[in-house]
Image: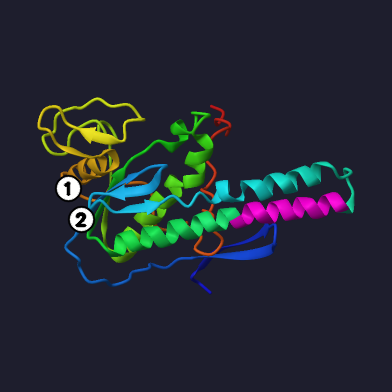
Amino acid sequence: MKQIKRVRVVRRADGYYVQFCIDTERREKREPTFKTVGIDVGLNHFYTDSDRKTIPNPRHLRKSEKSLKRLSRRMSKTKKGSKNRAKFRNKLARKHLKVSRQRKDFAVKTARCVVKSNDLVAYEDLKVRNMVQNRHLAKSISDAAWTQFRQWVEYFGKVFGVVTVAVPPHYTSQNCSNCGRVVKKTLTTRTHTCLHCGHVQGRDHNAARNILEKGLSTVGHIGTNASGDIDLCLGEETPLSKSGRGKRKPKK
């Protein structure tokens, strides 16, 4: 019982759950693979790595959007405060919960596979909070859950003793992975064609190779907090401790 540091009761659309925060260190053994990989996340594919492997984007929210809209319309036609409205509100909440769990399950399994298959994993240090300011891409970026994937990559990196490196995203798509020269291209340009050395390859594969090169040049393990307060059962992070914002200054 001394290992249990905190207990929380949380309510979800499908019932109540108890969360136990346990003070323990999780370590798992794995055989070295002597492989390194760079990962470029995207919307056409969930990610493309430096070995030219691509993982399809599952688009969980997009696939459930039709049923979510139907439930939302049916709920809006019910009378406020009625049992019928409460029933449809619960159905809608359960559907959203299912999408959230599907997204988390995909992120966990994909991150674990990537980490176990490599001795070093490099990825971009993306500022997703700024990227979702684009109203045309906000829903697709949120549905892809890049941040959640990154958190699990870093978590499993510590569990399996694999180096995970977050590299600056600047010019990873613009630089040529063959000669290093800058090749300007727009978001609609999906093929990298270097005018200097004649190198041609997919835009995402070129970026993944640049990410790996940056990762290999970085010494040590950098990134956000990955181990500790990640809930392995319910798919949500444990809230961080409250900051000191708003506290009154002591009187002199």
Relative to residue 81, is residue 101 depicted above or below? Answer: below
Q: Which of the numbered marks, if any, corresponds to residue 36?
A: 2
- Dot 2 lies on which element? strand
Nearer the observer, 5 or 110: 110
Q: CA distance from mark 2 to mark 1?
A: 8 Å
Percent x, y of residue 8:
62, 60
Q: Residue furthest bottom?
A: 1
Relative to 142, 79 lies left or right: right
Residue depth check, mark 2 versus mark 1: number of the one nearer the observer = 2
Percent x, y of residue 75:
80, 46
Write the residue at 53% across / 29% down: 135
Give the residues in magenta: 84-98
- Dot 1 lies on which element? helix
Relative to residue 9, is residue 40 depicted above or below? Answer: above
Percent x, y of residue 114:
32, 59
Q: Quadrant of residue 242?
A: top right
Residue labelled with disc 1: 216
Relative to 215, 114 lies left or right: right
Q: Give the colour scheme of this rendering.
A: rainbow
- Under mark 1, the amino acid is Leu
Give the number of marks. Answer: 2
- Under mark 2, the amino acid is Thr
Q: Quadrant of residue 228?
A: bottom left
Task: Name the N-terminal-most of marks 2 and 1.
Answer: 2
Q: Quadrant of residue 15?
A: bottom right
